Amino acid sequence: MANIELDDRVLSEETEETIKRRLFKLCMKGEWGKVVDTYESDKMAHMARITSTGDTALHLAVTDGQNYVVQQLVKVLMCEEGQRKESLMIQNDRGNTALHFAASGGSVEMCECIAYAEPSLLRMRNVDGETPIFLAALHGRKEAFLCLHYRSDYTNQMHFNYDSNCTRNDGDTILHSAIAGDFFGN
């Protein structure tokens, strides 16, 4: 009996490692349709951290600007009731979720898609204490900032102190970031 359990665990680890390698290769080759297919066919892919810094295929799709792929991956995750929240909330080694990356890059479409799927991501902080809305302001991504501001105000008005999402660990606020980056005016 112990051998069977050990064999199952080893097989599971091998399968997980195989999925990680396959997803990583597909992402690096830009074979995004096959990445979506893998997410659809294998639930283990949803939680797979495929880079040395702990990024998932969703993180990489956001970084690569793959709006449609991000929508498809999130759609697959939305069908997964049990793990949906955990899959969308995966943070890499710096504590960034896919929403942090979307906000930093300024993609309104991705921000809207991910934040709608899991509103609690709006409050998640990376290792520097930055929320997605803070990163949008830090990088001068006005449209993404406004999208996340609206989503925060609309979905979470009574659930948390909105102002705390606009300050990071060192005490800097989104206003400090906007002024330092000269992101005010036009």
Image (cartoon, rainbow, N blue to C red):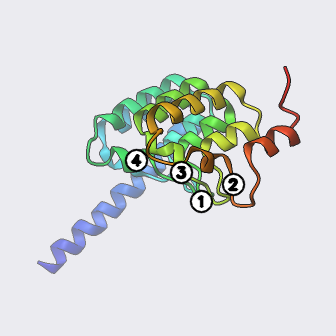
Q: Residue at x 47, y 28 (%)?
A: 113
Marks 2 & 1, CB-CB < 8 Å contact: no
Residue 157 in percent (x, y) is at 48, 38
Residue 36 in the image: state x and y as whole percent: 41, 32
Q: CA distance from mark 4 to mark 2?
A: 24 Å
In this view, the mark in front (2 or 1): 2
Dot 3: within a 10 Å radius of its alpha carbon, few (fewer than 14), some, or many (20 or more) residues?
many
Judged by depth in the image, the label closer to the viewer, 4 or 3, is 3
Q: Using a 10 Å C-alpha cutoff, classify the residue at mark 4 as few (fewer than 14 neighbours), some (14 to 19) or many (20 or more).
A: many
Residue 93 marker: 1
Residue furthest to the bottom in view is: 2
Q: Residues within 10 Å of mark 1 (few under 14, many from 20)?
A: few
Q: Is residue 19 left or right of residue 57?
A: left
Q: Which residue is mark 3?
A: 124
Disc 4 from disc 3: Cα separation: 14 Å
Amino acid on which disc 1 is placed: Asp
